[in-house]
Amino acid sequence: MKKLFTSESVTEGHPDKLCDYISDSVLDACLAQDKNSRVACETVAGKGEIVITGEITTNAELNIEQIARNAIKEIGYDNENLDIDYRTCRIHVSISKQSQDIALGIDKSLEQKLGEEVFSEGAGDQGIMFGFACDETEDYMPLPIYLAHKIAKRLATVRKERILDYLRPDGKTQVTIEYEDNRPIRVDTIVVSTQHKEDVELDKLRQDIINKVIKEVVPSVLLDDKTKYYINPTGRFVIGGPLGDSGLTGRKIIVDTYGGYSRHGGGAFSGKDPTKVDRSAAYMARFIAKNIVANNLARKCEIQFSYAIGVAKPVSIYVDTFGTGKIPEEEIVKLIYDKFDLTPRGIIEYLKLQNPIYKKTTNYGHFGKKDLTWEKIIEL
């Protein structure tokens, strides 16, 4: 049976990703000085304006406005008439300390309060988190999101290296893969919408994107004469970034994870320190799912964790191998319970999550990057 599946990605200049990057830049600055910082940083971007809000408890000394301006500059935004200018935009900072009610749940777990043998911080909130892996790519990611990220990252590369010097930072990509019997066989459709300077001809832009972006990163064996390309299908895309559309931290959660190929618990990642299980437990779930596939226990694996605020251990663990498992799913659940400490403190220490590593997670997905601790392969 043949079927199509589509995933999208966005460039680092997309308004929502600009906000994610600012929030993760603030988080990294906190952790660089105080590894025990509690951070929940939210950013909003609009026309010529950035608003940074949230709750931060830290001993770090920060110039949050300067952190934001540096982040905007790193992305490449320097023109208030086309998108936003890091030098002239207005930046408003409104930060408070972490709620004492939330801190109470994190600082001492319910298990400790009840006298159980769990000496750990509790979860900072209730929630469900999913991790996923499959054998479709070398990074154990689904092929649609894997290629969508590669194209989006290539857009940034050709812009920053001035291979295509008429591009601006904002952009989106979309890849549709044709599957046969649940295995990817070809690329059916590629969509790229990229911001550009006004003086470029649309025909030139379309040919450049196909030849210098798409064909540089998409394996030729997946492309054929039936593959469809839609490059800037509306035509003009000059006004972009926060001038074209507002941005908000945490609004690209499907781009950040598996492109819709796997379920999502609903929690965003960026701007949150690792005591927030929305982030840390999702990273751990990915780590375990990837290692189940890498150790040939299944070709595809999805894991769900659920947590309750103030409780250290997960309330439940669910595993689905979609009929590809080499051992029963009940045995995989038992393996997870036996091998891993899934308390917030256990995850933080195992994956070394109190280091300032989060800016490099912001763009092109939080999973599939080999230099991140939750992407390492171990023997189960």
Image (cartoon, rainbow, N blue to C red):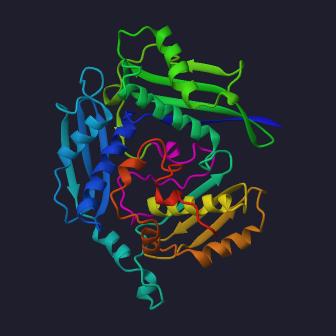
Q: Is residue 187 visible?
A: no
**Furthest-bottom residue in view?**
115
Residue 295, x across and y down, in percent: 68, 62
Q: Which residue is located at x 58 percent, y 25 percent?
A: 215
Residue 226, x across and y down, in percent: 72, 19
Q: Assign the magenta stretch its main secondary structure.
A: loop
Q: Which residue is located at x 61 percent, y 52 percent?
A: 263
Q: Which residue is located at x 25 percent, y 39 percent?
A: 50
Counting labels gives: 0
In which quarter of the view is residue 227 placed? top right
**Looking at the image, is 13 positioned above or below residue 19?**
above
User: Going by the image, does 143 lie left or right of 59?
Assistant: right
**Looking at the image, is 251 positioned above or below residue 33?**
above
User: Going by the image, does 196 lie left or right of 318?
Assistant: left
Which image quarter holds the N terminus? top right
In which quarter of the view is residue 220 placed? top right
Which image quarter holds the C terminus? bottom right
**Looking at the image, is 379 positioned above or below residue 155?**
below
Decide whether residue 257 is among the magenta residues.
yes
**Furthest-right residue in view?**
1
Q: Which residue is located at x 59 percent, y 48 percent?
A: 139
Residue 180, x across and y down, in percent: 79, 37
User: Going by the image, does 178 lie left or right of 261?
Assistant: right
- Near-viewer residue (275 or 299): 299
Decide whether residue 69 is among the magenta residues.
no
Q: Is residue 104 visible?
A: yes
- The magenta region covers 252-277
Residue 32, x across and y down, in percent: 26, 60
- Near-viewer residue (285 or 146): 146
User: Going by the image, does 258 lie left or right of 125?
Assistant: right
